[in-house]
Amino acid sequence: MTAAVSTLEIRNLHVSVETEEGPREILRGVDLTVRKGETHAIMGPNGSGKSTLSYSIAGHPKYTVTDGSITLDGEDVLAMGVDARARAGIFLAMQYPVEIPGVSVSNFLRSSATAVRGEAPKLRTWVKEVKASMEALEMDPAFAERGVNEGFSGGEKKRHEILQMALLKPKIAVLDETDSGLDVDALRIVSGGIEAVRAKGETGILLITHYTRILRYIKPEFVHVMAAGRIVDEGGPELAAVLEDSGYDRYVKGDGAAAPAGAGAVS
Amino acid sequence: MVVIDATGRPPMASGAVPRPVRSRNPLDHGVPTGREEAWRFTPLRRLRGLLAGPDADGKVSVTVSAPAGVAVEQLDAADPRIGRVLTPADRVAAFAMARAGGATAVTIPAEAALAEPVIVHLHGESPRTAAGAAAGVAYGHLSIEVGPFASATVVLDHTGSATYAGNVEVYVGHGASLTFVSLQDWDAGAVHVGAHAYSIGRDAKLRSFTVTLGGDLVRLNPTVEYRGPGGDAELNGVFFTDAGQHQEHRLLVTHTPRSCRSRVTYKGALRGDAAHSVWIGDVLIEADAVDTDTYELNRNLVLTDGARADSVPNLEILTGEIVGAGHASATGRFDDEALFYLQSRGIPPAEARRLVVHGFFAEVIDRIQVTEVRDRIMATVSGRLGETPAGDSTEAAAGAGAVVGAGAGPAGA
Ligand SMILES: Nc1ncnc2c1ncn2[C@@H]1O[C@H](COP(=O)(O)OP(=O)(O)OP(=O)(O)O)[C@@H](O)[C@H]1O
Ligand SMILES: [Mg+2]
């Protein structure tokens, strides 16, 4: 475990949620390894557990890990609170970012950068940094004074998520359907933002998506297919092309226990 | 918008908005038993006998700092300016008027445009008993007059400790504009009961902020009346009710002339065992008040178990031709998803909660243009959020649902 390599390791992860009928298991043994500089795509049909996996990595209290482990450079992530995980270098771009009325974007960004970096960023360089990152994402500077995600359109919320990723410079970024709800222009801009972070090689990216169109902009080295709470197939970029043509049908029939189409495991 | 009920008949007096007895004579007001609509939320025993009008044995000092041109006088009890706006609607207000022995009057001359606020500092100097309760009873009366076409900001700053019954009359001249802040920043043991009566002239504008942070029991009764068309009253409020505190705001806006506007926005945060807030928003639109535009809102954020927020909007409309009338009331918990979102950006839980509460209050507090007052309120709120609330394990808020109860009603609902 060298310090230079940031590695997120997920082993045999089982996760349940509390429902009215009692606990329901959603993730049923997920194994996945993401290293700094790598880009992984997780694809899968609706309800297969993709968001559950991302929330579990981030530590959402609604999801209970019943078995397995998550470590970051050997550190037990599951033992950390939500905020400690973020400070350890984990970032989650949410599928549905939350509105926080009355808390301005600028105040929020500065609070989170201060927390994650361990000290308040120097005001002058910080203002420049935010401005440059917003420009790269073609965000109007006026957003800085609005409430966090308050009244943002779907596309604006996603840009705001990627803006945070760019500023917080995580070791591991989980992007939960950052592409959904974006028109062609917005997809290009947001993809550009992700690509810029990726190009620095300091972040391992776990790109969760339902569709293949974002993969035209961001080329993952590894593609995983999730169905019914498990990784049921793994391969390289060519697997995405297969999914593009044939969809997820073969994985969902028989509850995810179908024949893989890809080229063997990658973890 | 024309409001006609489902039967197609024009509106009728529903009695939704109570019409209390109005008299300066305390004995014209019955002694409350606690079952009356006006008193049912108030813990009468904690009023420390104010309902009986005891002799004053404490002191609330009044210090006024005002820019040049503003007249500050002491009125004697017989002065006709006392009672011009306020006719007491309950015993405590009537006793306060009878026992205050006059009033402090602040007069802003016609057409003055004050660059600096008038600050009225009321400081409770009553000694505390061994039990830590404010013992001394004090009465007070303030009379504020803003001359025609003047514009001014007046800040009432209540600090210290007392058992205080104090009325405030605010007379806003035609075409004048007043920003009025009443800050209840009492020490923990204080009791404060007060009627704040505003009279709005033709085409005049009132923007008021009632901010209640301290005290053991605070019960305020802001009322608005209009003397001519074109009046505009914005009644904003903020309260932070901590363990054991009772904070009650009972508002009544009466639209009598045509074409007046009112906006009521109160936001409260509650925390700790037996924290109790009461918000009553009564709006009465009388038969001649055509073209009225009114909306009232109360939102409460319940930060822990054991706190209770009562919120009752009442709207009674006696004319069918108005621009708009509505109300909304919602009492909710911390939005756990918002807290998760902030924490997932590295922000520790306590700071995340502080940000959410600030954001909640910001809508109202950011409108206060008196920087010192605004900063002081935010700092007080921050300071109190920084403390560990009594009887709360800090993680208890997680896992609870977002909105406990919500209601919104159109006119005449
Ligand atoms: N809090 C919850 N309570 C009950 N069921 C839940 C909860 N969260 C998730 N689920 C269920 O778990 C399953 C997986 O949900 P999840 O959101 O992880 O899927 P997903 O792969 O992200 O789907 P999508 O592509 O629609 O975003 C679904 O059947 C969902 O209904
Ligand atoms: Mg999802």
Image (tube, grey):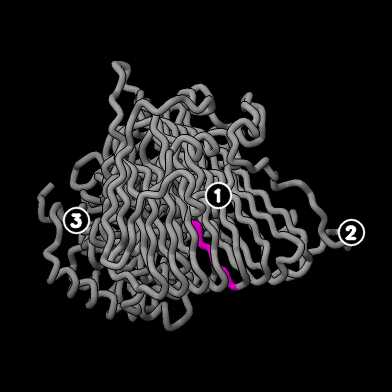
How far apart, in angstroms, are the residues tagged by discs 1 and 3? 52 Å
Discs 2, 1: same chain: yes
Q: Chain letter for mark 3, please.
A: A
Look at the numbered disc 1 and say if its residue's Cβ is closer than 8 Å to ligand 1. Answer: no
Q: Nearer the viewer, mark 2 or mark 3?
A: 2
- The chain letter under disc 1 is B
Q: CA distance from mark 2 to mark 3?
A: 60 Å
Q: Position of residue B352 (x, y in %)?
A: 32, 48
> Residue A79 at what x, y percent from top left?
27, 36
Rendered residue at 52%/71% (across/down):
B174
Please, what secondary structure does the residue beneath circle 3 have? Answer: helix
Mark identifier at residue B86: 1
Badge 2 amino acid: Thr
The residue closer to the viewer here, A243 or A210, is A210
Q: Nearer the viewer, residue B243 or B208?
A: B208
Mark 2 or mark 1: name the one nearer the start of the chain.
Answer: 2
Residues in magenta, as a range: B230-235
Residue B7, labelled with which disc?
Answer: 2
Single out the mark in the foreground, 2 or 1: 1
Same chain for labels 1 and 3? Say yes or no.
Answer: no
Q: Are marks 2 and 3 in contact (CB under 8 Å)?
A: no
Mark 1 or mark 3, whichever is nearer to me = 1
Could one spot residue A40 in this view of the protein? no
At a point 23% along the width and 65% down the height, the residue shown is: A167
Residue type marked 1: Leu
Q: Is residue B377 above or below residue B227?
A: above
Q: Which mark is residue A114?
A: 3
Q: Let me know if residue B158 appears in the view.
A: yes
Q: Position of residue A193 (x, y in %)?
A: 30, 74
Corner quadrant of residue B2: bottom right
Is B180 above or below relative to A26? below
